Amino acid sequence: MKSGRRYTVIFDGDCKVCGRTAKLLAQWDRAGELEIIPSQTPGVRERFPWIPEHAYVESLQVVRTVDGRTWQAAAALEELLNVLPKGRLISWLFKLPFARPLADRFYRWFARNRYRMGCGDHCAVRDANP
């Protein structure tokens, strides 16, 4: 199930907000750097055994293919900004003092409240922070 791409992005395929985000990433990824797959894809847990199952519901997971280094939540977004075309125009914001803690806090808030932003019943019944 190797993709030949530099990164694998794993998202909650049952979440409408996550699905829309995955589509945006696919459009932005003109160079084909990303393999973007739902966490429900057969073989994902066997392929990435170090990622706890609950992590897939809590946040986006980004895995560098060559060494397995994994980022999640706001750190995953920062890594994606460093990889995607013109993303570095925005990624410098993470270097500002207090930016990372604020981004992490916002990401956790968004994940907990995504059902209010169009995810639907799936996210309303599954707490992002069990």
Image: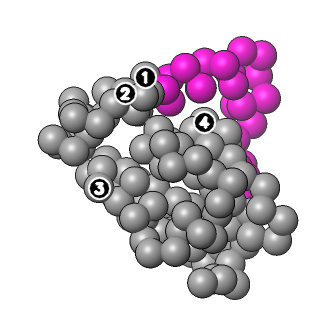
Residue 74: assigned label: 4
Instruction: Reply yes or no: does residue 83 show up in magenta.
Output: yes
- Disc nearer the start of the sequence (4/1): 4
Q: Residue 112 — which label?
A: 2
Magenta residue span: 79-108
User: Real-space Cα distance between discs 4 and 1?
Assistant: 11 Å
Picture coordinates of residue 110, whole percent (x, y):
40, 29
Lower position in the chain sequence, tag 1 or tag 3: 3
Mark 4 neighbour class, 10 Å CA radius: few under 14, some 14 to 19, many 20 or more: many
State left or right for residue 91 relative to residue 61: right
Question: What is the distance, in whole Å, between disc 2 and disc 3 at their CAs?
Answer: 15 Å
Label 2–label 1 contact, CB within 8 A:
yes
Mark 4 residue type = Ala
The crowd level at tag 3 (other Cα within 10 Å; few <14, some 14-19, many 20+) is: some
Q: Position of residue 46 (x, y in %)?
A: 59, 69
**Residue depicted at 53% across the width and 43% down the height:** 55
Q: Secondary structure at mark 4?
A: helix
